[in-house]
Amino acid sequence: MDFEILIEGIRRQLTQALPGEEAQYRMASYTRKDIELRKIKPRDDVRVAAVLAMLYPKDGKAHIALMQRTDRGAHAGQVSFPGGGVEEQDNDLTDTALREAQEEVNIRPNDVKILGKLTPMHIPISNSMVYPIVGYSHVVPDYVPDPAEVKAVIEAPLADFFNPDKLKTTDIRVPAGFVLKNTPYFDIKGFVVWGATAMMMNELLEVIKLGTSLRNAKI
C-alpha cells in the first residue's frame, strides 16, 4: 500500500463524523483544558481564518508542511500550518488556506487537491476561529518562505507524529509572560509543535488511524 491509499483513507474518513474536540484536547495545555475557559465563546468581532494541512510524498514517505512563525505577534516563534485570515477576494475558506500557503511558503494552489476539513477551533488569544483544510499534493513544494512571516519551513515526516518517543511535555513560556506547565507537544526535527497546531494535528492523526491501516500505508 502506498501514498495513494493513505490519501484515499483520509478522504473517506473525512466524510464521516470527525474525532473532534476529544482528539484535539488530548494535546491541549492545562489552560485550554480548563472547563471554564472552554466555555468562552468567540466575540462578535472574531477573526475567521483557515490553515492548510497538506500532505505530500518525499523520499518514499508522507510529509506534512509546517512552518515556524517569526518572533512577533501573538503566536511569535510558534510552529503552525500555513494559513491566515479571510480576505475579501477569497471565495471560501479553502481559497483562504491556499492563498495564505502560497503567500507564506510558496505552495502553489494548482498543485493541491483538497480532501476535506477538520473541526474548527476557537483561539482566544488571537480572537480567531480557525478552520483546518486538509489537502495533498504529488509535488514536493519549492518552498520560498516570506521573511516577514516565516522564520523556518519544516518538512515534517508524518511517521514522526505516530512515534511515541516524539510525544513529550515541557514548560512553555508564552508572550504574555506566564508559563504553561507540563504542556504536551510533538518533537519534530527539534521543533516544539504545541498548542492549536498540535491539537489540530492530533485530530488529523485520529482520522488517519480510523481511515487507514498504518502497517500498509506509506507514512
Image (spheres, rainbow, N blue to C red):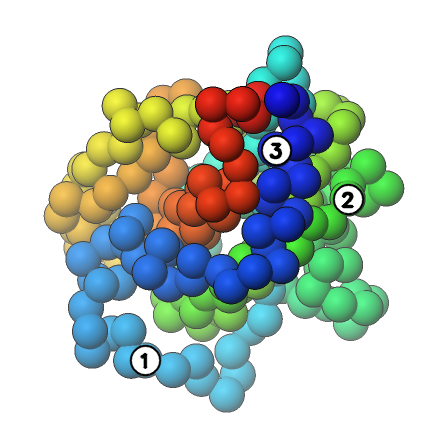
- Report, in whole angstroms, how far the alpha carbon at label 3 lies from the one at label 2: 14 Å
Residue at left offset 73%, top offset 49%: 114
Q: Residues within 10 Å of mark 2 (few under 14, many from 20)?
A: some
Q: Quadrant of residue 190?
A: top left
Residue at left offset 63%, top offset 11%: 59
In the picture, the disc for residue 74 is: none
Residue 186 in the image, given as x and y percentages of width and height: 34, 34
Secondary structure, mark 1, is loop
Q: Quadrant of residue 178?
A: bottom left
Residue at left offset 28%, top offset 27%: 164
Dividing the image into 4 quarters, which one contains the N terminus?
A: top right
Q: Amino acid at mark 2?
A: Lys
Residue annotated with mark 3: 6
- Report, in whole angstroms, how far the alpha carbon at label 1 lies from the one at label 3: 36 Å
In this view of the protein, can residue 126 be seen by the observer? Answer: no
Could you tell whether 88 is left or right of 119 in the image?
right
Q: Residues within 10 Å of mark 1 (few under 14, many from 20)?
A: few
Q: Earlier in the sequence, mark 1 or mark 3?
A: 3
Are discs 1 and 3 less than 8 Å apart at CB?
no
Q: Amino acid at mark 3?
A: Leu
Residue 111 in the image, given as x and y percentages of width and height: 82, 37
Residue annotated with mark 1: 40
Residue at left offset 38%, top offset 82%: 41
Residue farthest along the bottom direction in this orientation: 44
Count of marks overlaid on the render = 3
Could you tell whether 30 is left or right of 160 in the image?
left
Secondary structure, mark 3, is helix
In the picture, the disc for residue 113 is: 2
Q: Earlier in the sequence, mark 3 or mark 2?
A: 3
